[in-house]
Every structure is written in C-alpha cells, then in structure tokens.
Amino acid sequence: MKLNQLIKLVFMFLSYLVFPQEVMDVANLNIKLSLEQTADHYYTFDEGDEIIINFNMVKGRHMKLFEITALPSNIKLTEFKASKLENRKIKVTKKGVYRFRVFSSSITNRVCNLRIQRKPSKAGNADFNTDWKWNVVKDSTYIPYQIDSLVGYNTVEYKEIVKELKDTKLEEIMIFEKSQKVHSYYNGNVSRTHLKVDLPLVENTVLKEEKLLAWSYWIGVGQEGQEAYRESLESISGLVEKAASIDFKTPLAGLAIGAVSKMIIPQTGEDVSYYFVQDYENIQKFYNNQQFLQFDMGKGRGGFGRNDRLKKGSFYIGFHNDNMTTGIDVDVKVLAVKEIKTYENVTYDREKQEPQYVTLDKKRLEVKETRFRIPVE
C-alpha cells in the first residue's frame, strides 16, 4: 500500500511538470453603467497566479476608464476609453485582493463584458478561494480635554434700574372752537362750506407715552345752539353716567371717553346738514353736489358725537344750508382726549448668585475603526 501511494505522488508531480496548468474563470460579468457611474468588483489572487483579462464593449463605443489595482493602492493597469482588451495578463507577485473598476461618463447607457480568469502557478491550487472579507482594525487613543466643574456660588450685589409708571393723566385738547357762516341758497353765495380738522400729534419718548383715545364734536346752529352748549356745560355733573371720579372741564371730554352719552340739543331755531369726510377729493364732490364718501353725518339744530377709530391725520366737516332765504351761523367745537403716561427710572439694590467653576484636565478614550479587504482564507 505504501509503495502504491508513493508511485501515485510521483506520477502527479511529473504530470504537473509536463502539462501546463489549467486556466479557470473567476468572473464573467456584463456591466451596465450610465452617466457618472462606477462599478467596482473585488477578487483575491494567490502569489504566482496569472490574471488574464478580456474586455469587450457590448453597447456603446467605450468606457471612460478601466483600471486594476492591487489593494490598497498599487495600480496594475489603467486603460482610458477602454473598448477592447484581449488576453491582457498580470502577474501576481503577492497574495492579495485586486479591484477591477469600470467608470462611464456617457449620458447614454453603456454595457461591457468583463471576463476575469486566473492561471495558477502551482499544482493543487485550482480550488483557491478568490473571495474576500472585511478586516476591522481598532486603534485606541486617549484625547485630552478640559471641563469646567461647578464648585459653589458667590453672592454678588448689584444695582438694577427699573422703568416704573409714575403718573397717568388725561389731557383735553380743544382742536378748535369756531362759528362758521353758511349762506342761504338764494343769497348769491354757495350754500355749502367746510372746515378742516387736524388731529393732534402724539409724542413718545423713553419716559413718556402718549395715546389719542378719541375725539368728540359739538355742532349747534345760531344763538340757540350756543345756549344749549352752555346749559350742557353747567349741567355736566348730571350728564355723567360713568367714571364720575374723573373731573372733566367740558362735556365734550366726557363724551370722547364715553363717560357722557348725551348733551342738550336746542329745541328751536334753524337746522344744518353736516358731513364728516376723510379726504379733500370727496369734499370737492360735496361742493359740486356729487356723490361722495363720508364716515359720519347728521342734520338738525344741534348734534354731537365721538370717534375712537380715526386717531391721526386730518379730516373735513362739510356744512349744507337748505334754507332758501336765511343764512345761518354754525357753532363748531372739536375736542380730543389724550392719555399721557409718564415713567421714572428707579434704582434698586439687588443680589444674585454667580456660579464658581474650576477647570479640570481629563482624557477620553477614542476608538477609531479602519476596515479594509483581505483574502477570505
């Protein structure tokens, strides 16, 4: 038995010396790529192997790049505008993993066929495993760093300036008091006229805030209208329905903020039509007896009202006398009420707790993993 086994071994040795080694397929790939795509394929070869490459275009003229690299970075073959390679051979001097890269820059799909073969250099290596695996290497280092550590608190005294309300008051502003003549229809003059009202400006500074709350008006015709307003002035305490603790100089002030809801209207005398108009264009239409826009109106021997929506700018009051022969004098008063707040800066002694820290030197462990391909066996 031992002699027979020896004879077999000698025969196998002689056969490897006499007959060439068989060429084996490693991969036969059809690779399809579009614009800016790369295909990478990895295979392991043994020391002494001969790699045989055949590359052909199936669709398209060429691939932008075909490259073979012995990992990690030893480039064995580079072919630009690769279209055809026949039995290109690469000798393997050291066992390792090879990368086969194909890159396309074409906007259209391109297909190539890549056939990879190996020719072993020694007998008994036909079953060599060309697969690969990941090898993970961990590198541990200690990184120094600093950290602030809380050790306590200190009491710190400081001064704080606080803006505080000092006073709030209401200010009555009589925008104008005027007796306006409105001619009759047959007088030869226009039986329409108007007044312009400029609402007061508000002033705001660091320590003062002003706000226009509302404005009110009184319209009375002739001597009877003046007498009715004087009666309202004398009877102001009886007209007040709320906010009785506020001391008003005129009933119009109470009317503006809603503390007064009525005033005395003359029972005899002539009447007038009046219109509140917001712009000059509509006043011109009023004069021309055209349709115009107004935000308030009335007709009578007297009238009053308030407005808390229009608080800045100007507006107009138009008057119309429909009496054919008698002109009238219209007593007009417009009053605004401002709220004025004054502030003062008050300084207070305060205390606060400030944290105290010390800086500590420390180290932290940092593990960096590196992965690279190695032969599976």
Image: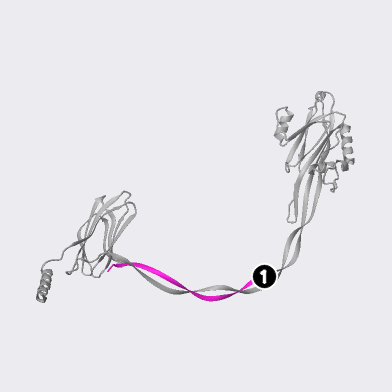
Percent position of residue 103, x then y:
31, 56
**Dot 1, how many residues are within 10 Å of its Cα: few (below 14), some (14-19), or many (20+)?**
few
Percent position of residue 69, x then y:
28, 64
Residue sitting at x 78%, y 47%: 338
Amino acid marked by disc 1: Gln
Q: Say whether residue 353 is magenta.
A: yes
Percent position of residue 263, x then y:
84, 37
- Using the image as rendered, state which of residue 101 and residue 236 is in the foreground: 236
Q: Say whether residue 89 is magenta.
A: no
Give the image quarter of residue 140: bottom left
Percent position of residue 348, x then y:
75, 65
Would you name the residue on which mark 1 appears? 353
Colour scheme of the rendered structure: one colour
Q: Is residue 277 left or right of residue 30?
A: right
- State the extent of the magenta-drawn residues as a range: 352-377
- Using the image as rendered, state which of residue 60 and residue 317 is in the foreground: 60
Q: Is residue 253 left or right of residue 76?
A: right
- Using the image as rendered, state which of residue 36 and residue 33 is in the foreground: 33
Quarter holding the C terminus is bottom left
Give the image quarter of residue 41: bottom left
As helix, strand or loop, the secondary structure at mark 1 comes to strand
